[in-house]
Amino acid sequence: MSVDPRSKALDHAFKLVGEYFFNWAFMEGRLNDLIGTLLGMDELQRLVACANLMFRNKITIAKSAISLIFPPASEEVEHFCRVLNQIDNAAQQERNTLAHQPFGVADDAKEFSVKWYKVSARDKLHFPKIIWTETEFYTRFYQLDAWATELDKISKACSERRLVIAMLDTGEPTQQNALLGLLGSQPPLQIPPHNSDIPNANQDTSLESSPQQERE
């Protein structure tokens, strides 16, 4: 029995699209890990919470929680949020289209390509042209893997930061001095006493203030 060459082409398209979503799911798992780290969840708590969150809500929670444990204007917050914004943009502009539109092989392309048949009808009916070459797929695979690696690094930095804050809550100077190296050049965030306002950028957050109270 002869094999339809178009069937082989479709199989290859299925492989590329499937690999994209595999890499996306792996990267999203690292985002879930970050949320668990930031909120101090155990594994089961993280699984329950993240299973009930839309992707954009995960990004919002991660950015907000990061701003609570790092000084808001710090380089760390700026970098972490930039990575999260890049991922969010990819979710809105690429991932959602790929997940909800039919696709097939682009017959008229010079390089093997996949074409999505998107319909847009918000203001007027039109059919956006969305074609990814095989090279573009692999570029996105590498980007998703890079984001997953970056999220792991952010999780590690946030875990170390939470450890420092917890140790500073004990009010023991020797522990403070021992752990300051984990923070790089950025001084640790002053933890306000119960029922007081979180300090803003204009308030003194130096280590010379009185011992800090346990953070809720």
Image: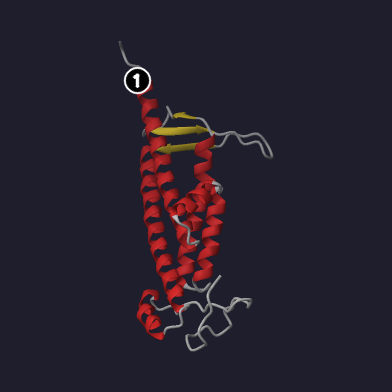
Callout 1 crowding tier (Cα within 10 Å): few <14, some 14–19, many ≥20: few
Identify which residue is drawn at 57% across, 53% down: 57
- Residue 110 appearing in the image: no
**Left or right of 90 in this view: 7:** left
- Residue 21 appearing in the image: yes
Q: Nearer the viewer, residue 86 or 210?
A: 210
Quarter of the figure with the C terminus: bottom right
Q: Nearer the viewer, residue 44 or 73?
A: 44
- Residue 162's quadrant in the figure? bottom left
Q: Position of residue 122 (x, y in %)?
A: 67, 39
In the rendered structure, which amino acid carries the disc numbered 1?
Answer: Pro
Q: Give the answer, above or below, for where 175 lies relative to 32.
A: below
Q: Residue furthest top?
A: 1
Q: Residue furthest bottom?
A: 208
Q: Give the answer, above or below, for where 29 lies relative to 121.
A: below
- Residue 163's quadrant in the figure? bottom left
Q: Give the answer, above or below, for where 1 lies relative to 135.
A: above
Identify which residue is drawn at 62% across, 34% down: 126
Identify which residue is drawn at 38% across, 58% down: 152
Q: Position of residue 177 (x, y in %)?
A: 37, 83
Q: Position of residue 154 (x, y in %)?
A: 41, 62
- Residue 79's quadrant in the figure? bottom left
To which residue does mark 1 refer? 5
Identify which residue is drawn at 49% across, 71% down: 70
Q: How many marks?
A: 1
Element class at badge 1: helix
